[in-house]
């Protein structure tokens, strides 16, 4: 009865006191002072809010809608209190709802955030750029993440230890939360001000409401938070040690040359993860002999253009606080060839060994899948004067390929002992409106004669800045990067001639290969100007470049060098629902690319339309045109070649994600002029959640490529080089299945499996005549049927170019088939706060092979006919904390 009286009082008093409009007090920062309480008065965290402290404290509220109708009253009001003692923050929250039976309590794993929820955001550094987020759902599930760059970057891998419970009753639902102060980072000032925000989601309405109003066109998110005043938290010392043990059993398909003939292998390992709070705002994280067996496998992919593929980081140690080490010096929203470039790409650490084992007939070799990480540490923090810093160091071990022939055994080193170092620093100034920063990375390898193709050392550095003005509505930012690699002449020659550089191109007069070099240097950067908020229009325009000698791929990621790119993005967005739409936007963007010789190589412009309908369905449709294309990489070191103009469209449609059945459709298409290119890529997503605890998602995808200008090989005829091309007919199909069952907030079962198959057939072989000609007959010479024949074993093509019945040259049959299956089944149990138990079953199989000219097999035969490897793993961790 006492709780109901409180609810009614809040509802009547609060709603009656709020005045809504386009102006008013919500444009100003709210603030209040949390109440300090003795430790002996700490509440019981059960979601009931019947402890004495909640009856004595002062409730805050006056929430206002953010989506879909900004600055309008929410469906249900929200009230909260914050109190704290020497060790913890305590937050009590009332979420009033006029229709309590409509409260959605879908279950989800940590960070899944399904159904109704409440989110607390603390800018405890009060730097107006970073924040710690804690979310509790109506079902009692938790989510947490860190925010950086004013909320533009989020890190959901952050898993602090905290407690929260929720309860649904006849007036709505309530939440009770305890957050240990040692899980936050703040200064050592006696009295402090923290930025603070509360966000509530009403799932059935797809509605967000906030405590501190932040208009949709506000240029900042974290910078617009309300404030907590007069906080006097005691300095905290955090020490967390988490030892773990892992036991695994691996089964592999029989290998006919394996002398041991044992398809089973068992491993046992142990390690230690730790976190030490050196001060209240400086933390040391470390890991010794880490194991990531519970991490989901990468999606399947294959690249025929020679460029490396970018995969997202999934390993917990490297994900946590990754935004601190981020130096992505081109805007990822702009897409393009530079969208993933970064001085630090953590997937380099623990990568697959780069060396190879050269075997003789009758020999059997085993190469490790990954390099062992012996240990890694991160030191990070931020001072009260706005200096943030991070240092990471990691050491990976020597890796060897074991080669066996009968009773004879030998091994070859395929990856050297390597040290990786990263340092990042940023200094805020000008009332948090500006910062200047820097970054340094280094890679050092202990090489032997077998690995001289690798760089002995690599160093990269960067300087960056950002300045905002006009209430942060406008900004200018820039970055400069430099690199130097050192190694043997073989290593530097290999870098010069790699797909990212191509110094050997015969028509690149501004480049030259020097086979005697033992070092190589380069530079790059980005400068941009933008408008972030205030009104319907946002804008960003800039220039980015990579010099021919820039090389970041030892510890960073870089797709290609020798480019200068101009870009612009202009968008118009709605700020209120209109007509059939809850919200909508129109985006225009373009790219123009030159090389360092001043040659214009690429023009692209796009227009995109986005909308969310009143029924919560969504749609995206875009058009693009590429009227000017010259490729420097298509011929893999050959001359720059003209490509006919290309154009196309992309689309995405989605049903209401609040429903039990969700349907999504997306894809894109591209067509090249004069019949030179055709692509169709289309995917479907079906997600079904019949009950709160269980969801299933199925994602089939099909890609068709028809490319008349597919590079095939090189040959020499009468002392002249032949660049051989062909017509590629490639079909790709993948099918991904994801299952989630959440027993309760601490116990979940997740499955992910993906089958992937791609086949490519080459025909209409030809060679290059004039790479810059715009006419097909002048650019290419197509072989007659009598000039090309396949060998009897289907492995090669033989060319008799002058038809004198003598073979002039040959090239391998390029037809291919690649099939892969990967899956992970993970049972995750948090048996104590911060202590985990994992049961994992992983399956994997892949096969890449040439296929004969007439060979055909069905999808099921390709995938399920593969030899499967299975891994069964048990991992347990225990958290010691003080």
Image: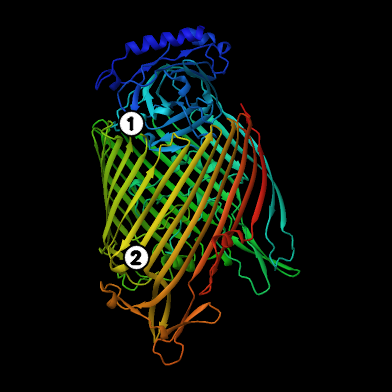
Q: Earlier in the sequence, mark 2 or mark 1?
A: 1
Rendered position, 14 above or below 828: above
Q: Position of residue 862 (x, y in %)?
A: 57, 62
User: Could you tell me residue 265's position as x and y percent?
Assistant: 72, 54
- Name the residue rendered at 41%, 83% in the picture: 785
Q: Is residue 764 left or right of residue 411?
A: left
| On screen, residue 302 above or below 569 | below
Residue 445 picture location, percent across and down: 54, 57
The answer to whether residue 568 shows anywhere in this view is no
Q: Quadrant of residue 359?
A: bottom right
Find residue 821 and report its horizontal and vertical position in percent. 57, 55
> Disc number at residue 677?
2
Considering the numbered disc 2 on the image, is that residue within a helix, a strand or a loop?
strand
Q: Compute the Cα span from label 2 to label 1.
A: 50 Å
Q: Which quadrant: the C terminus?
A: top right
Q: Residue furthest bottom?
A: 804
> Regarding mark 1 in the picture, which secondary structure is present there?
loop
What residue is drawn where x is 51% and y is 46%?
Answer: 698
Q: Residues within 10 Å of mark 2 (few under 14, many from 20)?
A: many
Instruction: Report the mark closest to the observer, 2 or 1.
Output: 2
What residue did someone put label 1 on? 432
Query: Could you classify mark 1 by the number of other residues whose Cα lies within 10 Å: few (under 14), some (14-19), or many (20 or more)?
Result: some
Q: Is residue 875 above or below residue 592?
A: above
Q: How is the image coloured?
A: rainbow
Q: Quadrant of residue 257?
A: bottom right
């Amino acid at each position: 009865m006492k709780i109901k009286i409180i609810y009614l009082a809040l509802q009547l008093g609060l709603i009656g006191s709020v005045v809504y409009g386009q102006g008013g007090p919500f444009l100003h920062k709210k603030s209040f002072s949390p109440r300090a309480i003795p430790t002996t008065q700490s509440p019981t965290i059960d979601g009931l809010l019947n402890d004495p402290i909640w009856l004595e404290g002062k409730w805050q509220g006056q929430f206002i809608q953010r989506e879909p109708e900004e600055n309008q009253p929410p469906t249900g009001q929200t009230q909260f209190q914050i109190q704290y003692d020497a060790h913890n923050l305590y937050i009590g929250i009332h979420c009033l709802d006029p229709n309590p039976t409509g409260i959605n309590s879908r279950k989800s794993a940590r960070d899944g955030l399904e159904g109704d929820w409440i989110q607390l955001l603390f800018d405890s550094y009060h730097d107006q750029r970073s924040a710690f987020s804690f979310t509790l759902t109506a079902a009692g599930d938790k989510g947490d993440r860190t925010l950086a760059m004013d909320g533009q970057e989020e890190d959901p891998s952050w898993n602090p230890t905290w407690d929260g419970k929720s309860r649904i009753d006849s007036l709505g639902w309530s939440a009770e939360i305890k957050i240990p102060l040692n899980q936050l980072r703040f200064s050592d000032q006696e009295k402090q001000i923290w930025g603070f925000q509360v966000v509530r989601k009403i799932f059935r309405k797809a509605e967000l409401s906030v405590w501190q109003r932040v208009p949709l066109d506000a240029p900042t998110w974290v910078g617009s938070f309300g404030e907590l005043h007069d906080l006097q938290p005691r300095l905290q010392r955090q020490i967390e040690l988490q030892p773990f043990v892992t036991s695994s059993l691996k089964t592999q398909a029989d290998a006919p040359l394996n002398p041991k003939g044992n398809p089973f292998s068992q491993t046992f390992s142990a390690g230690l993860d730790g976190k030490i709070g050196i001060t209240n705002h400086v933390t040391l994280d470390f890991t010794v002999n880490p194991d990531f067996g519970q991490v989901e496998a990468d999606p399947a992919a294959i690249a025929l253009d020679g460029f490396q593929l970018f995969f997202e980081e999934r390993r917990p140690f490297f994900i946590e606080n990754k935004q601190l080490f981020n130096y992505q010096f081109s805007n990822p929203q702009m897409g393009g060839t530079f969208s993933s470039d970064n001085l630090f790409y953590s997937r380099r650490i623990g990568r697959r060994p780069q060396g190879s084992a050269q075997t003789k007939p009758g020999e059997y070799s085993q190469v490790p899948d990954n390099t062992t990480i012996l240990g890694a540490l991160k030191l990070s923090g931020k001072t009260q004067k706005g200096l943030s810093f991070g240092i990471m160091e990691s050491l990976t071990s020597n890796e060897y390929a074991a080669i066996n022939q009968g009773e004879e055994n030998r091994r070859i080193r395929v990856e050297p002992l390597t040290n990786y170092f990263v340092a990042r620093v940023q200094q805020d100034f000008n009332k948090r409106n500006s910062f200047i920063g820097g970054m340094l990375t280094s890679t050092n390898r202990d090489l032997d004669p077998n690995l001289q193709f690798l760089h002995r050392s690599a160093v990269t550095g960067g300087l960056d800045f950002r300045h905002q003005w006009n209430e942060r509505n406008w900004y200018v930012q820039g970055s400069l990067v430099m690199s130097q690699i050192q190694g043997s002449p073989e290593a530097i020659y290999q870098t010069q001639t790699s797909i990212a550089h191509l110094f050997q191109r015969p028509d690149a007069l501004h480049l030259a290969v020097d086979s005697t070099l033992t070092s190589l240097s380069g530079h790059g950067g980005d400068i941009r100007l933008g408008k972030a908020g205030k009104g319907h229009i946002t804008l960003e325009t800039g220039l980015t470049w990579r010099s021919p000698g820039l090389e970041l791929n030892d510890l960073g990621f870089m797709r290609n060098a020798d480019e200068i790119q101009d870009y612009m993005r202009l968008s118009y967005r709605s700020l209120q629902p209109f007509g059939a739409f809850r919200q909508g936007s129109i985006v225009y963007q373009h790219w123009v690319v030159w090389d360092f010789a001043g040659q214009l190589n690429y023009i692209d412009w796009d227009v995109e339309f986005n909308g969310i309908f009143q029924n919560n369905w969504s749609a995206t449709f875009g058009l693009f045109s590429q009227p000017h294309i010259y490729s420097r990489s298509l011929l893999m070191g050959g001359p720059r070649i003209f490509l006919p103009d290309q154009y196309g469209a992309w689309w995405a449609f989605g049903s209401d994600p609040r429903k039990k059945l969700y349907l999504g459709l997306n894809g894109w298409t591209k067509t090249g002029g004069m019949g030179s290119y055709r692509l169709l890529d289309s995917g479907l997503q079906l997600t079904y959640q019949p009950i709160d605890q269980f969801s299933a998602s199925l994602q089939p995808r099909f890609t068709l490529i028809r490319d008349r200008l597919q590079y095939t090989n090189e040959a020499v005829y009468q002392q002249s080089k032949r660049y051989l091309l062909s017509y590629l007919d490639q079909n790709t199909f993948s099918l991904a299945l994801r299952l989630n069952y959440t027993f309760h907030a601490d116990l979940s079962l997740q499955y992910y499996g993906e089958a992937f198959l791609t086949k490519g057939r080459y025909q209409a072989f030809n060679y290059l005549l004039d790479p810059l000609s715009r006419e097909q007959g002048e650019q290419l010479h197509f072989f007659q049927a009598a000039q090309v024949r396949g060998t009897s074993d289907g492995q090669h093509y033989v060319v008799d170019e002058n038809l004198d019945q003598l073979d002039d040259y040959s090239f391998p049959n390029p037809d291919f088939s690649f099939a892969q299956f990967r899956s992970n089944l993970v049972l995750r149990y948090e048996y104590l706060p911060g202590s985990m138990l994992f049961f994992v079953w992983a399956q994997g199989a892949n096969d890449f092979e040439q296929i004969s000219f007439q060979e055909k097999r069905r999808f099921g035969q390709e995938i399920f006919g593969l030899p499967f490897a299975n891994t069964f793993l048990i991992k347990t961790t225990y958290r010691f904390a003080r």
